[in-house]
């Protein structure tokens, strides 16, 4: 039983550390998403961000392929990290309850 | 769909192989227990609990001639960089797996990380790891050839480090793993090999192993370590 408890405790410590690391990586990613608008036949880009519960469109004009790629990649990583972060949170919940056993909360 | 833990581990190894790094690495730690299954195919062997940690020993860091950024190599799988403690050992973390790099500690003990610039990581130097790099075996993991410590070295190493393990749970887990492997080796007819490896160790190391096995209830094992 001690072996199992030791492993679970170690895994809980790992998951707690991992949670912080995913949160750090998410905070590092550029905020918002680039969207394209076509106005009078010309294409312009806007950065859509949420600030204080409101959605804001920040004019970016014409952007380079490199910047487009950067935002596209950031969007992919954000989705991936959020999914993995929620997995880590589920693990933490499970490990905490498994370690608590019949002890009072 | 996210890859299963095993598939993810194989994918990590596949990428390291493609980058020309895998041949410089010996997989140590609890994942060995799983990969030993094929080695003990004919013997009584059931792998015990393994953790998420995939420990990769670099026996000769200077022998790595290729340059690759391992963190970048695994980034799109969802691995993020984590640092252990205040010493700054790099770990690549994923909810399913944690990849760590180790080197054998030589000379005076130091808690400084060992930089491996070819891989863009810091490795953790640990005592007695050189034992795991002796007489390695190769296991087929999917289509990959993965270097593992010989089970005899693995088991003796577990017993050697037992007293350095702080947590009682870890001590029990390591001792259990070592005993299971030694018994499986006996079952496979490799008692003499274990004895030879044991005899090749310094008397200090031999005494450590004997002490670690003092309270183990086994008819077979004490005779090997006379």
Image (spheres, coloured by chain):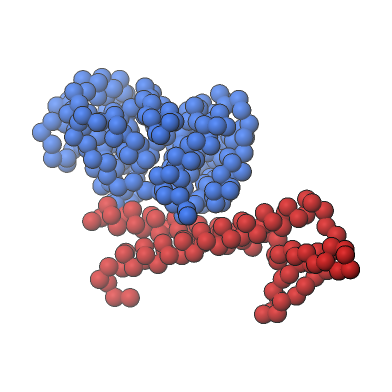
The structure residue drawn at horizontal position 20% and vertical position 31%, both measured from the top left corner, is: B43
| Residue B31 placement (x, y as % from top left) | 37, 40
Which residue is more in the foreground, A6 or A69?
A69
| Residue B109 placement (x, y as % from top left) | 47, 36
User: Which residue extends farthest front?
Assistant: A41
Residue B79 appearing in the image: yes
Q: Is residue B170 above or below residue B223?
A: below
Q: Is residue B71 left or right of residue B110?
A: right
Which residue is more in the foreground, B210 or B26?
B26
| Residue B138 placement (x, y as % from top left) | 38, 26
Which residue is more in the foreground, A96 or B110?
A96
Q: Is residue B103 left or right of residue A99?
A: right
Display colour for chain B: blue
Residue B210 appearing in the image: no
| Residue B173 placement (x, y as % from top left) | 28, 46
Q: Is residue B205 left or right of residue A68?
A: left
Locate the N terminus of chain A and report the quarter of the image it occupies: bottom left
Locate the C terminus of chain A and report the quarter of the image it occupies: bottom left
Count of numbered tags: 0
Display colour for chain A: red
The structure residue drawn at horizontal position 51% and vertical position 50%, both measured from the top left corner, is: B93
């Amino acid at each position: 039983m001690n072996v199992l408890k030791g492993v679970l405790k170690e895994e809980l410590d790992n998951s707690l550390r991992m949670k912080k690391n995913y949160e750090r990586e998410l905070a590092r990613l550029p905020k918002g998403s680039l969207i394209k608008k076509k106005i009078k036949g010309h294409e312009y880009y806007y950065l859509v961000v949420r600030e204080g519960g409101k959605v804001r469109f920040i004019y970016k004009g014409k952007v380079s392929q490199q910047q487009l790629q950067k935002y596209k990649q950031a969007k992919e990583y954000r989705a991936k990290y959020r999914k993995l972060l929620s997995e880590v949170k589920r693990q933490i919940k499970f490990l905490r309850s498994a370690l608590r056993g019949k002890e009072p909360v | 769909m996210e890859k299963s833990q095993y598939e993810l581990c194989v994918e990590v190894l596949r990428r390291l192989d493609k980058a020309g790094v895998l041949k410089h690495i010996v997989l140590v730690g609890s994942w060995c227990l799983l990969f030993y299954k094929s080695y003990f195919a004919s013997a009584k062997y059931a792998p015990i609990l393994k953790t998420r940690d995939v420990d990769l020993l670099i026996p000769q860091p200077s022998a790595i001639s290729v340059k690759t950024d391992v963190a970048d190599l695994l980034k799109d799988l969802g691995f993020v960089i984590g640092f252990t403690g205040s010493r700054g050992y790099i770990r690549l973390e994923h909810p399913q797996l944690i990849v760590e790099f180790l080197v054998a500690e030589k000379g005076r003990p130091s808690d400084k990380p060992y930089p491996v610039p070819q891989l863009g990581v810091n490795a953790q130097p640990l005592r007695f790891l050189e034992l795991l790099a002796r007489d390695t075996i190769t296991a087929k993991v999917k289509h990959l050839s993965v270097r593992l410590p010989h089970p005899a070295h693995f088991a003796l190493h577990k017993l050697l480090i037992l007293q350095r393990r702080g947590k009682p749970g870890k001590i029990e887990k390591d001792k259990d793993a070592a005993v299971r492997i030694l018994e499986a080796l006996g079952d496979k007819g490799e008692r003499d090999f274990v004895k030879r490896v044991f005899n090749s160790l310094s008397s200090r190391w031999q005494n450590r192993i004997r002490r670690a096995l003092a309270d183990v209830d086994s008819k077979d094992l004490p005779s090997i370590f006379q």
